[in-house]
């Protein structure tokens, strides 16, 4: 997904891998610390993160994905160009 390759293009200034809510470390993710635990840390600006907790995305990331999902060409219109020449393969 483009959002992971180019997070800054979409305003995610904290990159795509570092979690907003977590347990410290390089990516702010500790499997033994869940969001809501007393030892969990939560960022001040979740809209600048792609990842909420290392597994789930932030609301801002889901918003970008859903907007792109409905504004890009339909899947079948993309595939029609790939399958338009398939019928002629039978004559080979």
Image: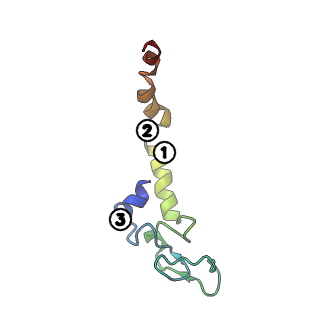
Residue depicted at x 41% and y 28%: 81
Q: Is residue 12 above or below residue 31?
A: above
Counting from the top left corner in percent of width and height, residue 63 is at 50, 58
Please tell me whether mark 3 sits on a helix, a strand or a loop: helix
Camera-nearest label, 3 or 1: 3
Counting from the top left corner in percent of width and height, residue 41 is at 55, 83
Please tell me whether mark 1 sits on a helix, a strand or a loop: helix
Please tell me whether mark 2 sits on a helix, a strand or a loop: loop
Q: CA distance from mark 3 to mark 2?
A: 24 Å
- Compared across the picture, whether 30 is left or right of 76 comes to right
- Compared across the picture, whether 66 is left or right of 6 comes to right
Q: Residue furthest bottom?
A: 39
Q: Residue furthest top?
A: 91
Read off the residue under disc 2.
Answer: 73
Q: Earlier in the sequence, mark 3 or mark 1?
A: 3
Counting from the top left corner in percent of width and height, residue 35 is at 61, 77
Read off the residue under disc 3.
Answer: 8
Residue depicted at x 48% and y 54%: 65
Q: Earlier in the sequence, mark 3 or mark 2?
A: 3
State if disc 1 and disc 3 touch (CB < 8 Å). Answer: no
State if disc 2 and disc 1 touch (CB < 8 Å). Answer: no
Q: CA distance from mark 1 to mark 2?
A: 8 Å
Read off the residue under disc 1.
Answer: 70
Badge 2: how crowded within 10 Å, few (<14), some, or many (20+)?
Answer: few
Residue depicted at x 46% and y 76%: 45
Counting from the top left corner in percent of width and height, residue 11 is at 37, 65
Closer to the camera in the image, 25 or 80:
25
Residue depicted at x 39% and y 63%: 7
Badge 1: how crowded within 10 Å, few (<14), some, or many (20+)?
Answer: few
Closer to the camera in the image, 20 or 70:
20
Q: CA distance from mark 3 to mark 1?
A: 21 Å
């Amino acid at each position: 997904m483009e959002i992971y390759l180019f997070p800054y293009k979409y305003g995610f200034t904290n990159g795509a891998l570092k979690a907003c809510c977590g347990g410290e470390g390089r990516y702010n993710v500790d499997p033994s610390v869940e969001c809501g635990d007393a030892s969990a840390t939560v960022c001040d600006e979740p809209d600048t993160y792609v990842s909420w907790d290392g597994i789930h995305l932030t609301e801002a990331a889901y918003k970008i994905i859903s907007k792109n999902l409905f504004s890009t060409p339909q899947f079948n219109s993309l595939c029609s160009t790939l399958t338009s020449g398939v019928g002629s393969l039978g004559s080979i």
